[in-house]
Image (spheres, rainbow, N blue to C red):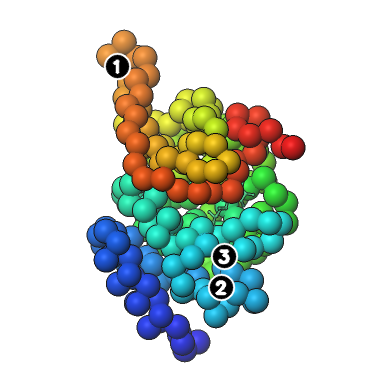
Amino acid sequence: MHDLRSEERAKLVEELKSLGISNTKLLKAFLKVRRELFVGKDFLRFAYDNNALPINSNQTISQPFTVAYMTQLLDVKDNDKVLEIGTGSGYQAAILCEMGADVYSVERLEDLHQTAKERLNNLGYKVKLKCADGSRGWREYAPYNKIIVTAGSPKIPKSLLEQLSDNGKLVIPVGDEKGQVMYEVIKKMTDEGEPKYLYKTFDDFRFVPLIGEEAWDDK
Ligand code: SAM
């Protein structure tokens, strides 16, 4: 099929570069993944604006800059085993697949989980998907080299720290309902076999809430 929107994607990639995104593999993935296939039909014309857009169930597909920023922090290497919490539209998962990661993704809302499953499957992305409370991670396949949380959490869920491998990295927005700070946490196992966590904070963002046992209550 002729790709009518490749110019818009290239323009978006130039914008991301001007905003400090420099990871070549990541920019290539952005050139490849057709964001218009991940947004609702009412928002097709806005697919390449650098904005978050509504998806079903009052949720959002994150702003392209936010996806790029978090993915750049995550520093994805070929064959990294990556756990994403908050599948949403499946766009972030597709970007991770294009970067050569082995992707696991958890979504708490059944309709979003089903839609993303069909969409990613039709596009040929081999993502392992589960509908569950991702604040508890996905223990069955742990440990993961990288974990990315695409919803705002009041704290860093203990289960996610536990499910990181040695030298693994977690990227998660932490804060209140009004705004969150981006955290990077790296796990290092000591010679005594104890985990040590190194924390770093980055810019401010605003995400929909991470709702679950180790995050916000479902009000
Ligand atoms: N990564 C998504 C994408 O590429 O479209 C955007 C994610 S959206 C900003 C956040 C998602 O996190 C929503 O779909 C929401 O339902 C989901 N979510 C919130 N709490 C969750 C939880 N405890 N476990 C799994 N998913 C959760």
**Label 3 beta carbon less than 8 Å to ligand 1:** no
Q: Earlier in the sequence, mark 2 or mark 1?
A: 2
Q: Earlier in the sequence, mark 2 or mark 3?
A: 2
Judge the density around disc 2: few (<14), some (14-19), many (≥20) Cα neighbours within 10 Å: some
Q: Amino acid at mark 1?
A: Thr
Q: Kindly identify which residue carries mark 3.
A: 53
Q: Amino acid at mark 3?
A: Leu
How far across and how far down the image is residue 47, in percent? 51, 74
Q: Is residue 19 above or below residue 143?
A: below
Judge the density around disc 3: few (<14), some (14-19), many (≥20) Cα neighbours within 10 Å: some
Q: Kindly identify which residue carries mark 2.
A: 37
Question: Disc 3 vs disc 1: which is toward the camera?
Answer: 3
> Which of 92/174 is in front?
174
Horizontal side of 120 relative to 145 (left or right) equals right
Question: At numbered mark 2, what does the secondary structure look like: helix, strand or loop?
Answer: helix
Residue drawn at x 44%, y 67% as measured from the top left? 50
How far across and how far down the image is residue 19, in percent? 30, 61
Q: Kindly tell me whether residue 16 is visible in this rendering.
A: yes
**Label 2 beta carbon less than 8 Å to ligand 1:** no
Residue drawn at x 57%, y 77% as measured from the top left? 44
Horizontal side of 6 relative to 111 (left or right) equals left
Q: Kindly identify which residue carries mark 1.
A: 190
